[in-house]
Image (spheres, rainbow, N blue to C red):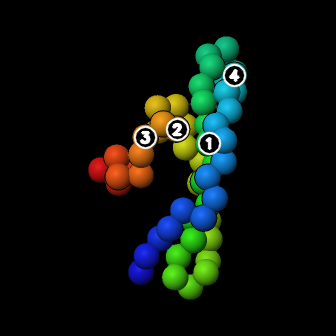
Amino acid sequence: MHHLPDQVGAWSTITRKTGEETRKRAVVIRDDSNRSIEITLWGNFVDKPGNDLEQ
C-alpha cells in the first residue's frame, strides 16, 4: 500500500499556553484505497523533507 501526500498546507506560528511560539503545518495523506487522514506537523518537523520524516 502506498501513502502519498495529497495536500500540504502552509505553516503557521502559534503561541502555546506557556507563551512559547512554535510552528505547525497540516498535511493530508491519501492511500491507494482513496482514504485520507490529516496529520499535523509541529516544531522542527514543519521544515523536514518527506524522507527525513520517515526516519
Q: Position of residue 24 (x, y in %)?
A: 61, 37
Q: Which residue type carries mark 1?
A: Arg
Which one is earlier in the sequence, the residue at label 3 or at label 1?
1
State which quadrant residue 7 falls in: bottom right
Compared across the picture, whether 23 is left or right of 45 comes to right
Q: Which residue type carries mark 3?
A: Lys
Q: Residue furthest top?
A: 19
Q: Residues within 10 Å of mark 4 (few under 14, many from 20)?
A: few
| Residue beneath disc 1 | 25
Q: Tag 4's secondary structure?
A: strand
Q: CA distance from mark 3 to mark 4?
A: 21 Å
Tell me what residue is drawn at x 61 percent, y 52 percent.
Answer: 8
Q: CA distance from mark 2 to mark 4?
A: 15 Å
Tell me what residue is drawn at x 61 percent, y 16 percent.
Answer: 20
Q: Residues within 10 Å of mark 1 (few under 14, many from 20)?
A: some
Q: Which residue type carries mark 2?
A: Val
Q: Looking at the rendering, in which quadrant would you find the N terminus? A: bottom left
Q: CA distance from mark 1 to mark 4?
A: 14 Å
State which quadrant residue 14 falls in: top right
Q: Does the residue at mark 1 contact the one at mark 2 (Cβ under 8 Å)?
A: yes
Q: Does the residue at mark 3 contact the one at mark 4 (Cβ under 8 Å)?
A: no
**Label disc, if present, on residue 14 of the rendered structure:** none
Compared across the picture, whether 39 is left or right of 52 comes to right
| Residue beneath disc 4 | 15
| Residue beneath disc 3 | 48
Q: Tag 3's secondary structure?
A: loop
Q: Please state which of the two labelled residues, at mark 3 or mark 4, is closer to the viewer.
A: 3
Q: Position of residue 22 (x, y in %)?
A: 59, 25
Q: Position of residue 33 (x, y in %)?
A: 56, 85
Q: Does the residue at mark 2 contact the one at mark 3 (Cβ under 8 Å)?
A: yes
Q: Which residue type carries mark 4?
A: Thr
| Residue beneath disc 2 | 46
